[in-house]
Amino acid sequence: MLGREENERLTRVGPGTPMGTLLRRYWFPIAGKADLDANPVKAIKLLGEDLVLFRDRRGRLGLIGERCPHRRVSMRYGIPEEDGLRCCYHGWMFDSQGRCLEMPAEPPESSFKDRVRTLAYPVEELGGLVFAYLGPEPTPLLPRWDLLVMDNVWRDIGVTVIPCNWMQCMENSLDPVHTEWLHGRYYEYIMGRSAGKDAGGERMVKRVIGHHLKIGFHVFAHGIVKRRVRLGGSEDDPSWRIGHPILFPNILRVGWTFQFRVPMDDTHTYHVMYQVLPVPPGAEPTQERVPVYPIPLTDERGEHITNFVLGQDMMAWVTQGPVAERDLEKLGDSDQGVILFRRLLRDQLAVVAAGGDPMNVFRDVAANKCIDIPVEYSLIEAARARSLATGQAPWSALLDTVENAWARAPESAG
């Protein structure tokens, strides 16, 4: 368990807090590029700061403070212009650097505008996402993780605002044994309850997830790899031999999926499910637009939707409370991954306090062209195995594998 003071230190993300200072060394996805199609101005909450993302009429992105420095009206209702975003109240205009370009009601000879700035942060697009950096200069490179920069793939982006602290989402990913219960027995119970029972009185829905015989964790260059051997498996299986990576500080990699857990403030997380799949033969190799869609958290009654795996995870994160009371928890041997993650957070806090760059801050362009992450599950490998087992042509096997992957894509978790 953690004492209350240490729990505060690891969970509070606002300006000036220890964890907020660490997290400001990283780029975070704040929107999908397609989010700006219908309205080129979008309110953003990130690391406890209220901001506005906009695209000017030249197509350039900006991220500035939400309140206009003049009379504190929200810039989320601003008007995009050729050179920036204009406040709807009195017409003050700001560019992406936070400079005030125009004050229409001031005398033409006034230099007042040259003495006014608003908060502004760097933003970049990559792989259909818009990323922001709120930290000190020099600004590090936006990490080019493999799924963000692959060619000849399709992508989609599912998003949810989750009313709890970001660490609850991340610690779930360092807890492999929950899968056999939350995503196995509980899934069985929920689906069986909705489907009814057959004549023999047994559940109509079966979802067997093998018991964990062995789990292991180790720190690698980009985070933590978790490994597991389930009943009926062995250490020769990819789940142990390769493992399942968590990229520090806030990304889970599952096969061809990233889950970004973005701290909006102390009690809200912007969750991004970023999915990548190979393009089938005959299809266009690139997308003009990467779609963004909401992943629901609750139903019309306000109850958590738990008939899919991510929904089960989100329920588990949220019902721990806005910020989990870790001083009351009772950890066992199966929680060794959670303990290791907390230790890694402390280690990286110490690195920043000493003036260094924490893990996954990139400054070498040559090393950032494409950061490949080994994973336990590959669509190509799965298609190859299907081809050998069924005699299908490789591309036909790949299409079947892709179809199956899309079918379970909302369940990418754990």
Image (spheres, rainbow, N blue to C red):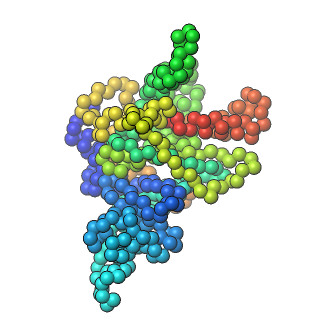
Expressed as whole percent of the image width and height from the top left, the position of residue 409 reads 56, 38
Q: Is residue 111 above or below residue 374?
A: below
Q: Is residue 85 above or below residue 244?
A: below
Q: Is residue 88 visible?
A: yes
Q: Is residue 141 above or below residue 223?
A: below
Expressed as whole percent of the image width and height from the top left, the position of residue 329 reads 28, 29
Q: Nearer the viewer, residue 38 or 132?
A: 38
Expressed as whole percent of the image width and height from the top left, the position of residue 405 reads 61, 37
**Residue found at the very far bottom of the displayed protein:** 109
Position of the N terminus by quadrant: top left
**89 with respect to 238 (left or right):** left
- Residue 72, quarter of picture: bottom left
Which residue is at a point 59% across and 56% down the rendered structure image? 289
**241 with respect to 339 (left or right):** right
Q: Is residue 315 visible?
A: no
Q: How many badges with numbers are in the image? A: 0
Q: Nearer the viewer, residue 334 or 408?
A: 408
Which residue is at a point 63% across and 55% down the rendered structure image? 287
**Residue found at the very far top of the displayed protein:** 200
